[in-house]
Amino acid sequence: MRFGRSVCQALGLVVAAGVALSACAGGEDEGESRDRNDAPQGWSVCNELFGAGRIDRLQDEMGGGTLAVLNAGTPVDELMSGRASVARSWKPGSEAHYANTSRPCDLGIDGTSKRFHAYVGWSVDSPEDIRAGDAGEGWQSLGRDVYVRREDGGLHLTAAIPCKIEGSHKAQKAELPLEVETEVRNVPEFDTELLSEMTAQLARKLAHGLPCRNDPAVPSEL
């Protein structure tokens, strides 16, 4: 009886291990079988900025079809250095930064109009403009460091974040906030909480990578 129990226990362990390995293999197959276009640089940038898990969730929300990178995908270190350079060249009254916006991660479902866009730049509106209502309606303050505007039912988010860049003009932090924008188009049922989380992640990634010397407190969701 004791021997029989030992054999049964051993067989049970083998079966359990086989199930676990099968589950792990299934997880890998599922991840590898995601329908995406061949754009290694673009996927690398999107994954680094938002996290690979969030990009997987975004694809689930976008629905069936091939998810494609729609832009060239500037390496993240180049994105950071380019944004910082624009801030260092800014002077009060300058408008050169208005048209200097990066789109680091543009995604879409092939053959459809379903789109995800991300924009990064320096805002045309200062925090003072936002507080005074001169930057349009809908802005909300999230603590002392972040302002956010939600449009299109939460499918279009814009965040303005005071961000001091080393070597920039002394007025840069007060007058030239970092601006992060995300937008989902033609996916009305998209999870707005996921978009909020992705926007916050992008803002935190930029604040750390530029870096923002004032260390702005960006929440986990916007």
Image (spheres, rainbow, N blue to C red):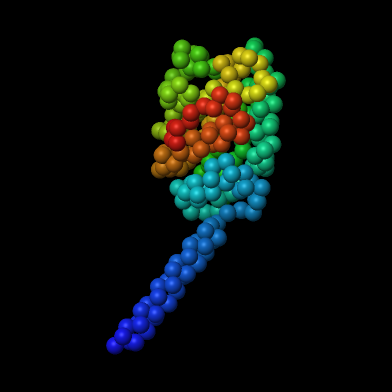
The image position of residue 39, as x and y in percent, is: 65, 50
Q: Is residue 199 above or below residue 43?
A: above
Q: Position of residue 28 (x, y in %)?
A: 52, 62
Vertical side of 90 occupied by 108: above or below: below
x and y, in percent, of residue 81 in the image: 68, 32
* Above or below, 22 relative to 169: below
Q: Quadrant of residue 154?
A: top left
Asked whether 85 or 195 is in front, the reply is 85
Task: Pick whichever, 218 or 47, lies toward us.
Answer: 218
- Residue 59 visible to an observer of this rendering: no
Residue ranking furthest to the front:
2
Image-quadrant location for residue 171: top right
Residue at (53, 45) in percent of width and height: 51
Q: Is residue 44 visible?
A: yes
**Which residue shows up at 41% across the image and 42% down it?**
191
Could you say where residue 127 lies in the image, as x and y percent from the top left?
51, 17
Q: How many marks?
A: 0
Q: Nearer the viewer, residue 13 or 40?
A: 13
The residue that appears at 29% across and 88% down in the rendered structure is 1
Residue at horizontal 52%, vertical 59%? 31
Q: Quadrant of the C terminus?
A: top left
